[in-house]
Amino acid sequence: MTKQEIYDVIGNSPQSWLNTARNLIDSAQILDEYFRAGLSKKITDERSFRVRPSSKMLYGFGIECLLKGVWVNEGNEITKRGIGKYKQLEKDKHDLNEISNTVCFDRNADEWDLLKRLTIIMRSIGRYPIAKNYLEYSGKIEWVGPKDYETLNTILQKLITRINSVAP
């Protein structure tokens, strides 16, 4: 196999997207545990408070991988076979709701809101001190505790189930 063919095979493999998503989500969970340990005073490392935005960014990128895994699982391509080039599913990079629309992933209001906030975190405070422009901050981006974790887990389970289902 050529490098281009390998690239296409990996890019169009639902399992590849699922594996990468699991790596990102596992990393996010480890950082979250570290943050919560600092919050509960089980540890006194001040760095534990700085990892929170990065953990949410990792959750967001994990969800993005799951959405792309759904896309390829349902017979679509992420890489154009024979060209060896990545195909972006969204006009606005890392927009989880836009990608959700593309892959026909139904969301309730809480799920839509969480994906919107994760998108903002992915584009800004998870990796940069600011967003691309001030308009990105036109809403709340904080994490709302247990409710957000429940919503996150629901999204993850729905997407993993779709990837693990047999393509139509």
Image: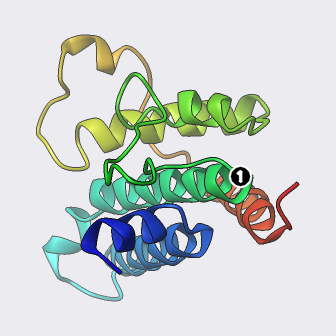
Count of numbered labels shown in the rendering: 1
Question: Percent position (x, y) of residue 114?
Answer: 58, 39
Quarter of the picture containing the N terminus is bottom left
Q: Secondary structure at mark 1?
A: loop
Question: Percent position (x, y) of residue 4?
Answer: 30, 65
Residue placed at 70% from the left, 59% from the top?
73
Residue placed at 68% from the left, 38% from the top?
103
Left or right: 129, with 61 as reference point: left
Residue placed at 23% from the left, 37% from the top?
124
Question: Percent position (x, y) of residue 12?
Answer: 53, 61
Q: Residues within 10 Å of mark 1 (few under 14, many from 20)?
A: few
| Residue found at the far bottom of this picture | 42
Q: How is the image coloured?
A: rainbow
Residue placed at 44% from the left, 73% from the top?
20
Quadrant of residue 6 in the image? bottom left
**Disc 1 residue type?**
Gly
| Residue found at the far left of this picture | 129
Rendered view: 108 above or below 168: above
Rendered view: 84 above or below 115: below
Quadrant of residue 162 in the image? bottom right
Frontmost residue, 1 versus 42: 1
Quarter of the picture containing the C terminus is bottom right
Frontmost residue, 9 versus 136: 9
Left or right: 48, with 7 as reference point: left
The residue pinned by badge 1 equals 75
Quadrant of residue 46 in the image? bottom left
Rendered view: 69 above or below 79: below
Question: Percent position (x, y) of residue 158?
Answer: 78, 57
